[in-house]
Amino acid sequence: MTEQLEKEGGRLSASPEGFSRRDALSFVTATLAAPLLPTFVNAAQGAETSSIGHDSRSRPMSFVKVGDENSTPIDIYYEDHGSGPPVVLIHGWPLNGDAWEKQTSALLSAGHRVITYDRRGFGRSSKPGIGYNYDTFASDLDILLNTLNLTDVSLVGHSMGTGEIARYIGKYGTKRLRRAALIGTLGPYLLKTEDNPDGVAASVFHEVRAGIKADRPGAVMEFLRNFYSVGGPDGKLVSERVIEANWTVAMGASPIGTLACVDAWVEDFRKDIARNDVPTMIVHGDDDRILPADATSRRQAKLIKDVKYMEIKGGSHGITWTRAEEINAALLGFLA
């Protein structure tokens, strides 16, 4: 004789009645779903309240609204931890705010308030079909800083995230800022032109776009292997599991945004950089296969008055992971 589970006074007890397959499925589904309900409810509440500027640091998920696309709001996901001098960490392509895992813990231990966020189209943020340019990225950052009322804040960017910092300064100035740190920087101007002969040929970016269009999963995996300079010194400092985890994050990003960001890479930041009057640190790997130092950091360092330049021998583009101890020591010293 089978047993059936039925509720009696809010408790589950056994009964000798027949136990149908439909009852079993209903019970299992309800049991599995129950632990998830608070997460979804809290996430929805976080999106609703944080978009109007309420302090949401105690909630598991927090969002700030940065715009609309037709009938859909565009929300940026962020995390806000700790107390002390605020630091905002801005991730690279095609990852999300979790890429700062090793820096977040070090900064919190040193007594900083640490804010990470996912760029529009990536991670847990909205995935609109519009806005994948640095004017919009800088506007999203400005809305976040204003919503959290951050002042005397240090901005730390990696790769694409360095473009947000440059354009933010170009558009909004430095009144809210204390310092800026650029790791694996994108600037000053990647595209090779008549007045920028040290840039990268346009054909390179055409090939990247074509690769993403033809086979986004394959193109991103190849990018990540170059990201960590697999085959070089830094390639020995990263596991296949890390690369696979990064790939999984990247596959969750907007296909539209993943492709459109390639056009943003070649925006000209020279006028933005000229407005940078805060102490700035630039850190770059000399084996960076994504943004070679000759075309980026070494040139950008010459355009900033108050700059500290650091180059890591054998360092890849992914030095925030592979050389975390060196990066963290440099950051903590610079932000002290």
Image (tube, helix red, strand yellow):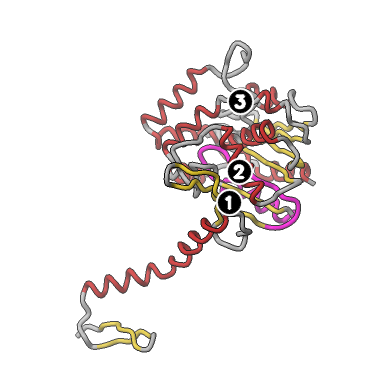
Disc 2 marks which amino acid? Trp
Q: Which residues are magenta?
A: 82-111
Does the magenta-highlighted stretch encompass residue 105? yes
Disc 1 marks which amino acid? Tyr
Could you say which disc has been placed on residue 292 in the image?
Answer: 3
| Position of residue 59 measured from the top left corner of the image (x, y, whole percent) | 57, 62
Q: Circle 2 sits on which residue? A: 321
Disc 3 marks which amino acid? Pro
> Is residue 221 visible to the viewer in this orientation of the structure?
no
Q: Circle 1 sits on which residue? A: 78
> Is residue 327 visible to the viewer in this orientation of the structure?
yes
Q: Quadrant of residue 33?
A: bottom left
Q: Residue at x 69, y 58 (%)?
A: 82
SS at circle 2: helix
What separation in Å lies between label 1 and label 2 (alpha carbons)?
21 Å
Q: Is residue 92 above or below residue 16?
A: above
Residue 116 or residue 217, whichever sits in front: 116
